[in-house]
Amino acid sequence: MQKSQAYSFEQRRVGNWVPLGLMYAAFYMSRYNLTVTNPVLRDAYHWSKEQFGWIISLSLAVYGISVFFNGPLADRMGGKKAILIGCIGALAANLIFAAGALFKVFSWDHQPWMVLLNYFTIVWAVNMYFQSFGALSVVKVNAAWYHISERGIFAGLFGAMIQFGRILAVPVGGVILACSSWEWVHIIPSIVLAVIGIYTLISVRNTPEELGFPRQDDLLAGEEDKESPSLSYIFKKVFANPTMWFFTGAMMATGLIRHSIEQWAPSYFVNVHNVSTDSKVFLFAFTGQVIIGIFGAYVLGYVSDHYFQSRRGPVTSIAYFMQAVLLVIFALIKPGPWMAAILLMVLYFFLNGCHGLIAGTASMDFGGRKAAATAAGMLDGSQYLVGSITGVGTGWLLDHFGWNAWAWSIVIFAVIAGILMATRWNALPEKAKKKELLECEVCGMELPAKEEKCNGCGTEIKTNVIKRLALAAKANYNTAIFYYVCFYFPAVISGVKLLGELIDPSTKKPDTMAVLVFAFIGILIAISALIRLFKTQRDIEEAGLSEEYGPINMAAKNMSLISLIIGIIVTAYGFYAFML
């Protein structure tokens, strides 16, 4: 069957965001690896948590300030070039950071602690400067490739790729640390950055028009008709919009919550519960956080697009209040290691969902393709800048008041963010709020532009039916890709474990709980997706649109079936391994 234009576009769009997603995953791997080497470096050089906190605080502050300047730069030079600049810089900085091991080789560790601390602090701050090109470049490119009605789902789809970087940084980084020295936790991400950087250079394009496809995103009010927008347009579009400042306030609160957890949670498990970085509970906690975070971004994005007309305020407001509830529970019950892992995983469901919807999606919505990077810089930068307090500040808090004060110190910020987003309940970019009217060809009655049937004579509005089915088919395809990517990861893990058991029957029983839960939930989701796909297929056939939108929906159906089969196999293996 000849591929339709819609199917060809979707395939090429996947070919565009996959290298970008892998690139930002590599950015995460080369950024959050510091949380793994945190306790090791503190022990090696006899630093307190507050002293090591200077590395965290300065680097987050540098990141937060840098995105404000690099956002307009990326808007003018293009997202592809900007992310490649960040890739090269982060690669070099991680290698130089790893070279700090030379202090040990030459017995320079006897120098005053300030000398070594300054070295690591400055190098990691440089790394975070180049890291700041990552998020805003991704947002810049994808603002042109996704319509506003698709961006909520895209937040989950792209978040799946990004969070794989956290898997590589923390759980995999913990295994690397257990098997070798700490510097390899920084060297290996540099190698990954080099490989994916070449892939990005070859595959990524800034806009669909560069490949001959039509424009996908809305033309926002007042948008300049030139490739490189003026700084006056960028600043007016982003900084003169009151909604952006409410979003910024919520992202500041997100920064305090997110970085307090992400920077110190590994140390919490090591120091409070005395678990090693390659233990079952450690791997379960941080692999589980990533898996649940992926679903959080997808679920909140899906709900925002399908039930709140692409409004981001209602969903994030509710999610912030849920974070506050979970933090209070954590502080009150003082959980054991497994319960702590579960609570932090559920918390991350809502936390990552909010982060994706505001920093990733809302920046595309309100910045548009011309100012998306600046909008992302404003939102992402604010959360990193304020989050920098969690380095020295949280370190000082833990040194003086212990881990019991950890959760209590950030509860209020979840409440504040929930209130701020509640005030933006109906916020939409100007183009999305316009209510255009159309005239019925039969009775002449004026109707809202989205109506599929005339309220007067019942005549079907064919163009709107086609638009609805086109968006449904595209959403189904994106969702199927999401399932396929998510299921691939546990399938590979389970396959490797099973192969190891077959080769060496004496292999110790694997920890399969995270994979088992993930796969079982995935089965239920894949079944619901297939039900929706069959309904869309029937609607497409009834509307006589099988030639144009049949292929893309069929591809989505096949991928969902594959995901379902993989989920069943992985779940069956999980039960088998768990019952051994």
Image: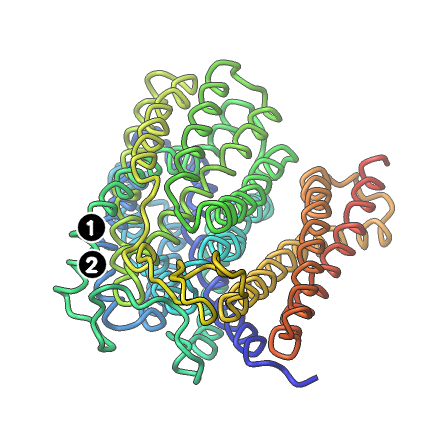
Residue at image coords 71%, 60%: 534
**Camera-nearest residue between 163 and 354:** 354
**Camera-nearest residue between 57 and 148:** 148
Q: Residue 421 appears in which quarter of the rendering?
A: top left
Q: Look at the image and tell me whether residue 200 can be seen.
A: yes
Secondary structure beneath label 2: helix
- Name the spot of residue 325 as percent of width and height, x first: 46, 23
In the rendered image, which residue does mark 2 sit on?
Answer: 237
Label 2 amino acid?
A: Lys
Contact, mark 2 vs mark 1 (Cβ under 8 Å): yes
- Name the spot of residue 335 as percent of width and height, x first: 55, 19
**Structure colour scheme:** rainbow
In the rendered image, which residue does mark 1 sit on?
Answer: 241
Q: Name the disc covering residue 2, or none.
A: none
Q: Label 2: how many residues lie within 10 Å, few (<14), some (14-19) or many (20+)? A: many
| Quadrant of the snapshot with the N terminus | bottom right
| Quadrant of the snapshot with the C terminus | top right
Q: Residue furthest top?
A: 332
Residue at image coords 55%, 23%: 273
Label 1 amino acid?
A: Asn
Residue at image coords 36%, 53%: 97
